Image: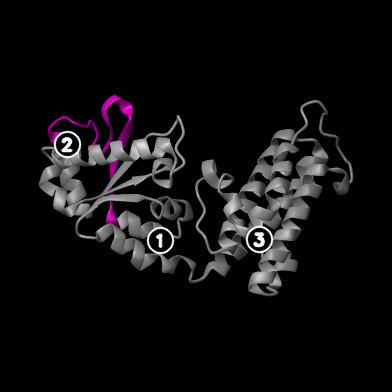
Amino acid sequence: MNYRSSELLEKAKYYCNELSKHHILSKYWYELALVLKGSTARGNSDQYSDIDLVFFCDKNILDRIVKDYYDEGLISREDGIFLPLPEWIGHYNLESYDNLIGYFKEKNYPEIWEYTNVIILHDELNRFSGIIEEYNDYVFQDVIADIKDKYLNLQLTLDWLRHPLKRGDELSVILHCSNIIRLICQLSYLIDEKTYPHDKWLFYYLKETEFGSRKENKIKELGKNIINNNIPLQVDKELDEYSQYVLADGIITDLKNQIQLKYGNQPWLDEWYSFV
């Protein structure tokens, strides 16, 4: 944990104590869990980081807290709470345990990644930690199905990339290549049976995956070569004359081999077009 993270963590603990004395929250404190998430919890804060606190509780408790806040004029809406800490050093909001369980059941990988990389500040009933422990193994029970879906989407996107390249449609090329990079990164995590983060951290942590540790520079090269501002995209060239396509195709081939190495010769790896 870097110095900035340690500093913010101590302030988060202070505000945890302060919030426990809040005239509304204190009435429900025993039934609440409070976690610190984000870069501060992960230990890599920078000058842009803040304190991101999330309360968890049962839905009926959440509704009562929201009503109490609204009735006292502390919030202007009745569908939730999102409030700043003093001087906007951070903020806090409330979620239900049902939402947390839903992230796991729906395999919402970015949210699972978010909430399995937190620091628990208060969880007297062990509800939050119990849910994480109970549902964590559930996520990867059928990971090959999710790998297959993303791999088919990846191959299909590469196939569609042909058309905007040959038409010289630069914006469409940017969209397709960006989606290809996103899918490659997401698959890199899933192959290792790891959840993946939201887009803003997707590439940052890629080197922690086996595929990403080997192909990080190639993926970065693809990103840097999507469009050359000094040379207009040429129309009607052969596909192997487009660096974007060649780079993407090469990385996808390597990714296919990685999947095959770990999960065997799946029929959809080579004959993907028969499964979309």
Q: Earlier in the sequence, mark 1 or mark 3?
A: 1
The residue segment tinted magenta is: 69-97
Are there few (<14), some (14-19), or many (20+) residues within 10 Å of tag 2?
some
Element type at marker 2? helix
Identify the residue shown where x is 15% and y is 46%. 64
Q: Seen in the image, is 78 located left or right of residue 192?
A: left
Element type at marker 1? helix
Query: How far across and down, in percent of the image, does residue 74 sit?
Result: 18, 31
Q: Which disc number belongs to residue 104?
A: 1
Q: Is residue 43 above or below residue 171?
A: below
Q: Is residue 93 above or below residue 60?
A: above
Identify the residue shown where x is 25% and y is 60%. 127
Q: Which circle, 1 or 3, is nearer the viewer?
A: 1
Quadrant assignment, res 146: bottom right
Q: Seen in the image, is 38 located left or right of residue 144?
A: left
Residue nearest the viewer, comparing 42 with 67: 42
Query: How far across and down, in percent of the image, does residue 181 sit?
Result: 65, 47
Question: Mark 3 sits on what residue?
Answer: 152
Identify the residue shown where x is 85% and y is 47%. 239
